[in-house]
Amino acid sequence: MNREAIIGCILGTAVGDALGLPYEGVSPRRAQRMLGPPDRYRFCFRRGMISDDTEHTCMVAQSLIEARGDVDMFTRRMATRLRWWIVALPAGVGKATARSCIRLWLGFKPRNAGVRSAGNGPAMRAAIDDLPLMLNMIRASSRLTHTDPKAEFGAIAVALAAKHSRNHKPVDANVWLMQVADAVGNDGAQWIDLLRQVIVSVESKQSTLAFAESLGLTKGVTGYTYHTVPLAIHAWLSFPGDFRQAVTAIIGCGGDADTTAAIVGGIVGSAVGRQGIPDQWIDGIWEWPRSVAWMQNLGDAFAKSMSTDQPISAPTIHPLAVLIRNLFFLVVVLFHGFRRLAPPY
């Protein structure tokens, strides 16, 4: 995984997250009337901010740098980051992730902290993984918060999609599906059947929104991984080399739009790199302390860690800075929440 792919994955995740955030929890029809198309940032004074989707991707990258291929070390580093992450009062935390973080503080070991959930938390942070021990790392990351195998299957599909996206031009959906099938085994037969439906839909030129509606998701994509990941894969396969089209297509499906767009952004960003992401979208991210420059430094450190046997230091952030930022972020989130009480409905 080269430097451009890593930085494209991280920044692609951040841009998708920030673009989709104002649309989170809103149906496709109401989103069009209330917000308009997702062609620019609409979160805070025409600027974008990231949510837990990007934060978890960054924490995974930091932990992978420090682990140097050691799965147990990765799990411990990630668990430590999750403990302190929840203390900083992040807004919009998934229930399963929040419960797992609390269990970590109560003294549960990382291997026992996860809860039975098929949420999309593991999938949202999976695209950055690309190591010889990738599947073991993904399983460790998934089980840290979500123990339902479905969550793990979703994360595996996303990680392999990102890897396939950057290594195959053009993308071959059937080759990717075979890799996923090999990774999940016989227990994932239902999952493979669902992903095969995605490929058939894309081959028939069905839009991502129409496919979502065929699954009964007329009010938006839910946080259930068997809804989130197939729709994200559909958007990727529909526009494998077009970041703008892929991300706007998935946001147009509504629902958990920040997570779905973050996943798609990470997958396509891995293929197109930073240069394939619109400059105005990168420049429009308004973040601190996880700024665009900080995320690029993280990508550089990750790339270096994969090309040398020497220890590489992962970029860090000050916990107090994160808390201050999260309090401001919460105010903006509350504003959007109150705004949704008003028309148009």
Image (cartoon, rainbow, N blue to C red):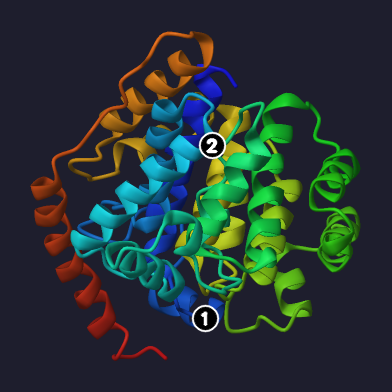
Amino acid type at mark 2: Val
> In the rendered image, is residue 245 in sight?
no
Q: Earlier in the sequence, mark 2 or mark 1?
A: 1
Count of numbered badges drawn on the protein: 2
Label 2 element class: helix
- Considering only vertical position in the picture, is 103 above or below 229? below
- Considering only vertical position in the picture, is 292 above or below 312? below
Residue 191: image quadrant is bottom right
Residue 27 disc label? 1
- At label 1, counting other C-alpha atoms closer than 10 Å, the crowd grade (few under 14, some 14-19, many 20 or more) is many
Q: Label 2, label 1: how many angstroms apart (C-alpha)?
A: 40 Å
- Considering only vertical position in the picture, is 103 above or below 215? above
| Left or right: 200, with 276 as reference point | right
**Looking at this view, is 40 or 70 the one in front?**
70
Label 1 element class: loop
Residue 250 lies, in percent from the top left, at 60, 60
Residue linked to disc 2: 71
Name the residue: 69% across, 64% down.
149
Amino acid type at mark 1: Ser
**Looking at this view, is 303 or 45 the one in front?**
303
Q: Quadrant of the N terminus?
A: top right
Name the residue: 37% across, 53% down.
18
Residue 57: image quadrant is top left
- At label 2, counting other C-alpha atoms closer than 10 Å, the crowd grade (few under 14, some 14-19, many 20 or more) is many
Residue 8 disc label? none
Residue 195 lies, in percent from the top left, at 82, 59
| Left or right: 190, with 20 as reference point | right
> In the rendered image, is residue 182 in sight?
yes
Name the residue: 19% across, 68% down.
330
Q: Quadrant of the C terminus?
A: bottom left
Name the residue: 52% across, 81% down.
27
| Left or right: 242, with 53 as reference point | right
